[in-house]
Image (cartoon, rainbow, N blue to C red):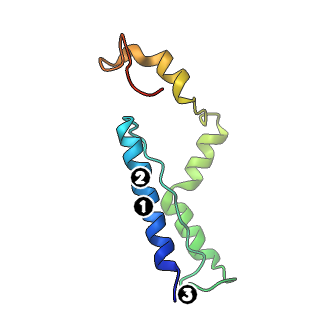
Amino acid sequence: MRNSGILANKFNRFLLKSIQCDLSVNNISLCLPRCIKPNDKKASHIFTDSLVCHQVRYLGLMENVRVRRAGYAFRQAYEPCLERYKMLCKRTWPHWRGPA
């Protein structure tokens, strides 16, 4: 009996819930995991350097690292952000009636 199908289903449900939660809060930037395959054979303990380097370049992960190192990795918590910028949206100004 293979558990990978069960695990994949749980992971897919988790992603769908997180996306729906993000969309319900009007969070436009979805944060999805980037999975990198270490080899084409789906075998453990085998690491293909050229395949991994290609995936890292294709996904733009090196650019993400450069941006974060440059100091643009600041992530403000939701409540202070809402308090600071709520006047920019008609739905949140002057009275916000949603979860904070």
Tag in front: 3 or 2: 2
Query: Which residue is denoted by mark 1 in the rendering?
Result: 13
Figure check: 53 above or below 27: below
- For the residue labelled by badge 2, is the local secondary structure a helix, a strand or a loop? helix
Q: What's the CA distance linking mark 1 and mark 3?
A: 26 Å
Q: Disc 2, disc 1: CB below 8 Å?
A: yes
**What kind of residue is marked 3?**
Lys
Q: Disc 1, disc 3: CB below 8 Å?
A: no
Tag in front: 1 or 3: 1
Query: Which residue is denoted by mark 2 in the rendering?
Result: 17
**Residue 62 falls left or right of residue 94:** right
Q: Which of pointers 3 and 2 lies earlier in the amino acid sequence?
A: 2
* Residue 90 horizontal/vertical position (percent): 29, 17
* Residue 91 horizontal/vertical position (percent): 31, 20
Q: Which of pointers 1 and 3 lies earlier in the amino acid sequence?
A: 1
Residue furthest top as drawn: 94
Residue depicted at 55% across the width and 87% down the height:
41
Badge count: 3
- Residue 13 falls in which quadrant of the image? bottom left
